Image: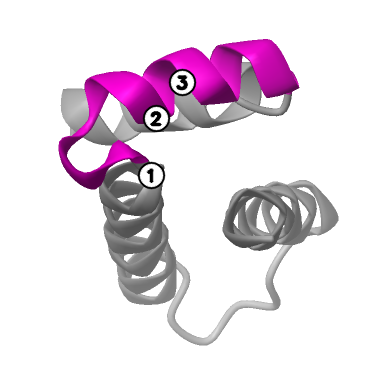
């Protein structure tokens, strides 16, 4: 789980183009693909845990907002 949260932090830092270029250069292949893969995996786990914990409950606005922000981050890094 810690790797997931670190991936989120690194992903948000990579919204800065200079940071993204540096991080990409450090990763295999010179692209942020590994980081995006880690973020997508974290997002899958986060959604799965949320569904198991909140079975039968309506998803809260704060959680929906967090998932939406993470999905937006993934899309930004892919683009």
Within 10 angstroms of label 2, few (less than 14), some, or many (20 or more) residues?
some
Magenta stretch, main secondary structure, is helix
Judge from the rendering whether residue 48 lies leftward or rightward of residue 62; answer left or right.
left
Residue holding disc 1: 31
Picture coordinates of residue 4 (x, y %)?
Answer: 28, 36
For the residue pair 38 and 21, the one nearer the viewer reads as: 21
- CB under 8 Å between discs 2 and 1: yes
Residue at image mark 2: 24
Q: Residue 26: within the magenta? A: yes
Residue 71 in the figure: left or right of residue 61:
left
Name the residue that disc number 3 marks: 10
Using a 10 Å C-alpha cutoff, classify the residue at mark 1 as few (fewer than 14 neighbours), some (14 to 19) or many (20 or more): some
Picture residue at 63% right of the left edge, 57% below the top: 67
Residue 5: x %, y % from top left = 36, 27
In the rendered image, the vertical position of residue 72 relative to residue 26, given as above or below: below
**Circle 3: element type:** helix
Q: Residues within 10 Å of mark 3 (few under 14, many from 20)?
A: some
Q: Which residues are magenta?
A: 16-30
> Disc 2 on helix, strand or loop?
helix
SS class of the residue under badge 1? loop
| Gap between marks 3 and 1 measured at Cα | 14 Å
């Amino acid at each position: 789980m810690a790797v997931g949260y670190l991936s989120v932090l690194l992903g948000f830092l990579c919204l800065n183009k200079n940071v993204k270029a540096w991080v990409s250069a450090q990763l295999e292949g010179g692209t942020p693909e590994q980081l995006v893969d880690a973020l997508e995996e974290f997002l899958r786990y986060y959604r799965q845990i949320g569904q198991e914990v909140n079975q039968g409950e309506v998803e809260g606005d704060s959680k929906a907002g967090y998932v939406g922000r993470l999905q937006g981050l993934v899309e930004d890094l892919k683009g």
